[in-house]
Structures are given as structure tokens and as C-alpha cells.
Image (cartoon, helix red, strand yellow):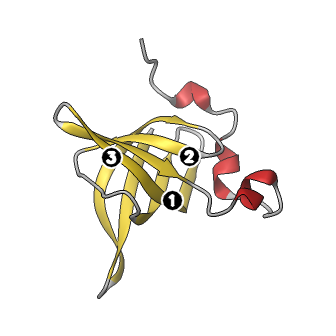
């Protein structure tokens, strides 16, 4: 699944920084491969493109970044508090991805 990554700049607001590829996701976060390194703790926004829908401006935080060949493997958290995951926040964006695992590439 294609993912566009945006980072907030001091001047100019949210700006596109790179295009990444989603490897896996669940209700807690997303795993990406990216050509660009992002430091843990960085707050970003994502546009996720699946064959059946587009989610825009999904908020996430980088929790890990490791070199993987010529790219970086990023671990992202898509919630701010456990209350969001538990359901006290209506319509958290990442919930729309539930059941769409078929669009991810097969990992063998």
C-alpha cells in the first residue's frame, strides 16, 4: 500500500517529505519501508492509498527506525492514548483499515 509521509515545518506547515510502502498494520500502528530516515519521536501525518479507499492526514508518531538494506524500516504508532484504541474516540482513522489486509503484499 502506498503511503505519503508529511512532516510539520516551522515555516509552511505540513509538507510532503517522502513516499513509503506499508508492510503491515493493525489497530496500534503501521510498519513502513521508507527511503528516508525519520527519528523516533517525530510526529508525522500519512496519506494511505489502498485500492478501495484513501485515508488522508492520519496522525502517527515514529517509535522506531532501523536500516533495512537501502531503505529504513519505520515503526509508527497511530494513537495518542489507549482510550483511542479502546474506543472512546469515535471513528479513529486507522479503524477504517480493519479487514483490508488483502491489499498488503504477501511476505514470504
Q: Distance between the residues labelled 3 and 2?
A: 14 Å
Q: In this view, does 31 lie above or below 69?
A: below
State the SS at label 3. Answer: strand
Q: In which quarter of the image is residue 41?
A: bottom left
- Which residue in the rendered view is the most extreme toward the bottom? 11
**Residue placed at 33% from the left, 46% from the top?**
65
Instruction: Tell me which residue sits at (44%, 52%) in the image.
Output: 63
**The image quarter in which residue 43 lies:** bottom left
Which mark sits nearer the N-terminus, 3 or 2?
A: 2
Say which of marks 3 and 2 sits in front.
3
The quadrant of the rendering that contains the C terminus is: top left
Residue 94 lies left or right of residue 11; in this view the side is right
Contact between marks 1 and 2 (CB within 8 A): the answer is yes
Give the structural element (helix, strand or loop) at label 1: strand
Marks 3 & 1, CB-CB < 8 Å contact: no
Q: Residue 40 carries which label?
A: none
The residue under label 3 is 65
* Residue at 31% across, 50% down: 19
Label 2, secondary structure: give it. Answer: strand
Q: Which of 78 and 12 is in front in this view?
A: 78
- Measured as percent of width and height from the top left, residue 87 is found at 82, 55
* In the rendered image, the vertical position of residue 34 relative to residue 80, given as above or below: above
Res 10 → quadrant: bottom left
Among numbered discs 1 and 2, the one appearing first in the sequence: 2
Identify the residue under disc 2: 29
| Viewer-nearest of discs 3 and 1 | 3
The residue at the point 70 percent across, 48 percent down is 95
The residue that label 1 is drawn on is 60
Per the model, the C-alpha gap separating discs 3 and 1 is 14 Å
Amino acid at each position: 500500500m502506498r503511503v505519503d509521509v508529511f512532516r510539520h515545518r516551522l515555516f509552511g506547515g505540513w509538507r510532503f517529505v517522502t513516499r513509503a510502502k506499508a508492510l503491515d498494520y493493525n489497530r496500534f500502528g503501521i510498519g513502513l519501508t521508507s527511503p528516508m530516515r525519520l527519528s523516533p519521536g517525530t510526529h508525522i501525518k500519512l496519506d494511505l492509498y489502498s485500492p478501495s479507499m484513501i485515508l488522508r492526514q492520519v496522525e502517527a508518531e515514529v517509535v522506531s527506525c532501523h536500516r533495512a538494506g537501502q531503505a529504513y524500516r519505520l515503526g509508527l504508532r497511530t494513537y495518542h492514548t489507549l482510550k483511542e484504541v479502546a474506543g472512546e474516540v469515535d471513528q479513529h482513522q486507522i479503524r477504517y483499515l480493519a479487514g483490508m489486509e488483502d491489499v498488503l503484499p504477501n511476505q514470504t
